[in-house]
Amino acid sequence: MLKNWTVTTQPVRLATDGIIMRERYLLNKKHGNHKYTETLVSIFGNANTSNRIALVGEQFRLNQQLYNRRGGRPLSSYAMEYCLTLPKGYRPSKEQWQLIVKDCCLALAKLCKLNKTEFTQYKQQIRAVLHQQKQNKTRGSGDHVHLIIGKVVGKRVLKELQQKKATKLIKQSFNLSALKHVGIDHKSYEPIEIKKGRRLSTWQYQHQKATEALEIEKQIKQMQVQCDKWLTAREEGDDRQKRRQENRLLKTYESLKNHPLSTQQIEQIQSIKNIIR
């Protein structure tokens, strides 16, 4: 179970340079971070949208320097970026992601209490790109959308977009929208590999799984040996030895119940249980 689907937030820094760098990154198939990315799909806006965000930001910054007699630091971040991520195994369509992003953007617009003119400009400064990830790799994230929203509308900066209440709101909106449009509920999600701890590196995790598999095989072989001894004791009428092996078989079986078993391993254990019944 997850508390929320994953949402990360960060301001796009470095003014116009930052906006242009993010635009290049979003559709750069050769970028090192896109090693496990299958497709890059624009779902809202295009390069012109990023240029518009940068232009509006530069205009605001110029006016800030011209008319702000109180001084202060000039605006250096013209947009906020939100990354909406689903675990591997889920692949909404482009159209479904569009609906999800639309719901999230509307929720943020309501938080900012935009008037009609501001809302029109707000809609023109939304850039979203879907990254569909390889689903059969142990590394890399699941499918995700990079959502960039311009912070400047009219004569004001939407400071609400980078506050904690905005992060909380977009997480709630993402949860609800994914359930509404895709039919997936974060509360019922179970990781594919529950035993994989968050802080384990890849090699540590693989070593742990290999060690566990060897232990399972060792205990199943031990059960087979104990079963053979039980059969011998039954043929020889040695009740004491028979009870001893029954107790050992029970302990080994209880130990195996704590491990994740394959279908074949479960069948092996079941066949041993059938023999001694």
Image (tube, rainbow, N blue to C red):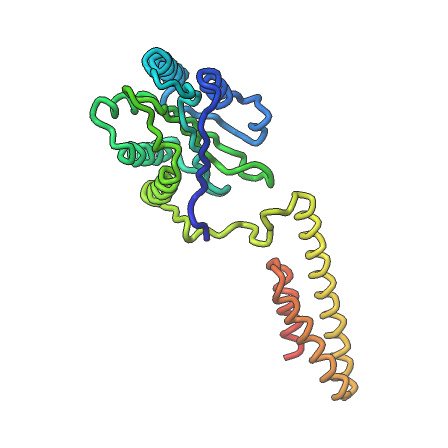
Task: Identify the residue shown where x is 35% and y is 19%.
Answer: 70
* Place of residue 192 in the rendered image (x, y in percent of width and height, measured from the top left): 54, 50
> Is 260 or 17 nearer to us in this picture?
17
Quadrant where the C terminus sits is: bottom right
Picture mark count: 0
Report the residue that reaches farthest toward the left. 116
* Place of residue 12 in the rendered image (x, y in percent of width and height, measured from the top left): 45, 25
**Left or right: 126, with 214 as reference point:** left
Q: Can residue 46 be seen from the camera position used here?
A: yes
> In the picture shown, does residue 157 fall above or below 133?
above
* Place of residue 66 in the rendered image (x, y in percent of width and height, measured from the top left): 34, 11
* Place of residue 257 in the rendered image (x, y in percent of width and height, measured from the top left): 61, 67
Task: Identify the residue shown where x is 76% and y is 71%.
Answer: 225
**Left or right: 223, with 274 as reference point:** right
> In the picture shown, does residue 65 fall above or below 218?
above
Q: Can residue 52 be seen from the camera position used here?
A: no
